[in-house]
Image (tube, coloured by chain):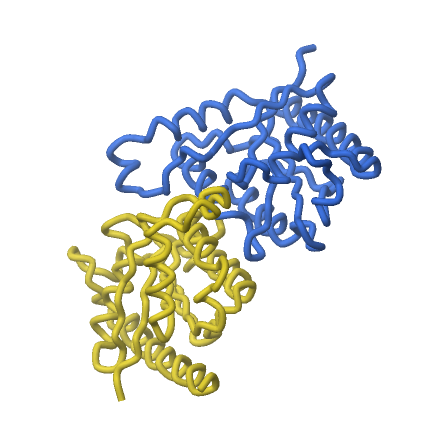
Chain colours: A yellow, B blue
Amino acid sequence: MNKIKVLGISGSLRESSFNTALLKSSIEHSKKYLNIDIYDISRIPLYNHDIEKKGIPESVIKFKSAIASSDSLLFALPEYNSSVTGVLKNAIDWASRAESPLNGKPCAIMGASGGLSGTAGAQSHFRQIASSVNMICMNVPKFQMRRSKSLFDENNILTDQTTIEHLNKFLKAFEDWTLNCINKKN
Amino acid sequence: MNKIKVLGISGSLRESSFNTALLKSSIEHSKKYLNIDIYDISRIPLYNHDIEKKGIPESVIKFKSAIASSDSLLFALPEYNSSVTGVLKNAIDWASRAESPLNGKPCAIMGASGGLSGTAGAQSHFRQIASSVNMICMNVPKFQMRRSKSLFDENNILTDQTTIEHLNKFLKAFEDWTLNCINKKN
């Protein structure tokens, strides 16, 4: 069987973001069974219905097409002000419009925080948003990373063994989750 | 005494947005005691810490300055996918950074929906975001407008008398709320 095709989406645009680094580590640790591509959402403009009516921007068409052609979505969620980032929410707002490729799409969420929150607030808001657009979001295991700086090396590579073990469990569970969701659909 | 200076912020960029129209109606119905200016957040770029480090964009400096020089903030919140719009959250994410003018700022929230939700989901998420950035958000009265299209005329002017009465109560309460918050600070 072909490897599962996953679109990885980071809610941070910062180049050395721990959340983006977590997606890169996920690629590394799951390459035998998942094919994760990271999608850059920095070119998606602010949502405006007037712009949408004139014609959906090329960057949004590409984003929706990348979602549609993936088996599942892996979100890395920074927490800004107790919620998801505006940047990520804006991308979801665009993608959720007519002929939404999010509808019925399996997904999982992970998050890295600098402090102790583990992005729990962002994950809680995201689950409500996900259910609203009918993404099928994996409940467990959770992945909420605290004190992220201490868990990566100077090249932003995940080096903490306990975290790597949990990441492996999480990614295997995500493979199962995706396969179950896909099989139910077929 | 001078009228209270309010910055009105709509979460929708659509020109004929019911939420923006609600702010315009608020100006009309409170002009004897509130001085509401509507701020256009369409020029605020997607938040990116790398951009911020190079220099805060002019549009963000202007936005933060407008917040700082207002007595309170009046948010009109559309609900997209059970939450606030990405566009609005992104503006808050920028404003909440170093020397946040949101810190301690009184605010109130209103929302107009096309259907029956009354933007309750967006308001719930917003209250958590507001507490996170330490805005002092008025709890009651609530303002959650349902079936908005039927309450405005063809020029987007609020014509429904029951709604206008509630809006007047809401805006008077918001004046009191702002005055109480300001007095506590002084």
**Could you tell me which residue is drawn at 54 percent across and 36 percent down?**
B15
Single out the residue that lies furthest toward the top: B1
Establish if B83 lies above or below A180.
above
Establish if A106 lies above or below B103.
below
Establish if A146 lies above or below A70.
above
Rendered-image quadrant of the C terminus of chain B: top right
On the image, which quarter does residue B65 sit in? top left
Residue B95, how many percent across, how many down?
A: 44, 34
Nearest the viewer among A118 and A65 is A65
**Could you tell me which residue is drawn at 70 percent across and 10 percent down?**
B1
**Could you tell me which residue is drawn at 83 percent across and 38 percent down?**
B162
Single out the residue that lies furthest toward the left: A155
- In the rendered structure, the answer to whether residue B153 lies left or right of residue A63 reads right
Nearest the viewer among B69 and B120 is B120
Q: How many marks?
A: 0
Nearest the viewer among B173 and A142 is B173
- In the rendered structure, the answer to whether residue B25 lies left or right of residue B72 reads right
Single out the residue that lies furthest toward the bottom: A1
Residue B16, how many percent across, how many down?
A: 59, 37
